Image: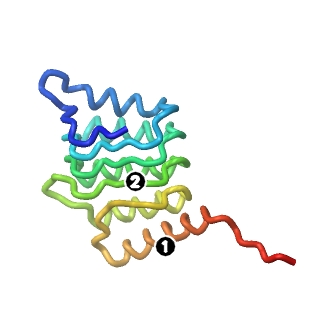
C-alpha cells in the first residue's frame, strides 16, 4: 500500500495518522506500507507505530522516511523492531527534524537487531563508524540466515 506523499495530518482530520498507525497492529493483509513524505511526526504517532510493530506479524516492508520523527521517536520504533519477527525491510532516513540520528539511537538500533533476525534491508543514516559496523554485521547475519543452506551431495 503506497500512501507516500499523502498528507495524513490535514487540519480537518488530525488524528487520521494516529488511527492508521494503531490499526497497523491488527493488520493481517498489508505486507508493504509506504508512509514516506506523509508529514508524520513523533510523540503519540511514534508510540502507536512502535506498539503496532510489536503486534504485527504480516508487514514485510515499512517506509517512514522523509517525515518529522525526532531521534528519540525513532529510538522508540527501533526498540519495537527487536520484537517484530516479520519485517524484512525498514526505511526511516531523511527525517525533517533539527536533530539527526546519533550514537544513542544507533546503539538502540543495534540492540534491536541483536534480537531481530528478519530485517535484511535498512534505510537509516549510519553516521558513526562503530555503530555502522555493528548494524551492518547484524544485517549480513540476517541475510545469510535467509539464504537456503547449501548441502554437499554425499
Tag 2, which secondary structure?
Answer: strand
For disc 1, the marked residue is: 137
**Where residue 143 appears, x then y in whole percent?**
54, 66
Q: Residue furthest right?
A: 154
**Where residue 150 appears, x then y in whole percent?**
71, 72
- Indicate the quadrant containing the N terminus: top left, top right, bottom left or bottom right: top left
Characterize the local packing of mark 2: few (<14), some (14-19) or many (20 or more) Cα atoms within 10 angstroms.
many
Q: Quadrant of residue 93?
A: bottom left
Q: Residue at x 54, y 57 (%)?
A: 115
Q: Residue at x 27, y 51 (%)?
A: 65
Q: Residue at x 67, y 64 (%)?
A: 148
Q: Residue at x 44, y 54 (%)?
A: 89
Q: Could you say which is closer to the camera, residue 127 or residue 120?
A: 120
**Where residue 125 appears, x then y in whole percent?**
29, 65
Q: Residue furthest top?
A: 12
- Indicate the quadrant containing the C terminus: top left, top right, bottom left or bottom right: bottom right
Tag 1, which secondary structure?
Answer: helix
For disc 2, the marked residue is: 90
Task: Please say if 12 is above or below 70.
Answer: above
Does residue 18 appear to the left or right of 151 in the view shown?
left
Task: Please say if 102 is above or below 77.
Answer: below
Does residue 60 appear to the left or right of 69 in the view shown?
right
Give the mark, 2 or 1, whose residue is nearer the N terminus.
2
Task: Please say if 102 is above or below 84.
Answer: below
- The colour scheme is rainbow
Amino acid at each position: 500500500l503506497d500512501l507516500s506523499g499523502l498528507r495524513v495530518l490535514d487540519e480537518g482530520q488530525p488524528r487520521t495518522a494516529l488511527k492508521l498507525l494503531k490499526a497497523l497492529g491488527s493488520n493481517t493483509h498489508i505486507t508493504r506500507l509506504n508512509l514516506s513524505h506523509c508529514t508524520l511526526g513523533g510523540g503519540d504517532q511514534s508510540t502507536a507505530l512502535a506498539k503496532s510493530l510489536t503486534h504485527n506479524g504480516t508487514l514485510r516492508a515499512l517506509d517512514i522516511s522523509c517525515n518529522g520523527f525526532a531521534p528519540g521517536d525513532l529510538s522508540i520504533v527501533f526498540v519495537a523492531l527487536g520484537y517484530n519477527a516479520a519485517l524484512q525491510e525498514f526505511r526511516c532516513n531523511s527525517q525533517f527534524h533539527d536533530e539527526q540520528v546519533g550514537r544513542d539511537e544507533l546503539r538502540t538500533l543495534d540492540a534491536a537487531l541483536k534480537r531481530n533476525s528478519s530485517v535484511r534491508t535498512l534505510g537509516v543514516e549510519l553516521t558513526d563508524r562503530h555503530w555502522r559496523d555493528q548494524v551492518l554485521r547484524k544485517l549480513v547475519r540476517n541475510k545469510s540466515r535467509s539464504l537456503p543452506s547449501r548441502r554437499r551431495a554425499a
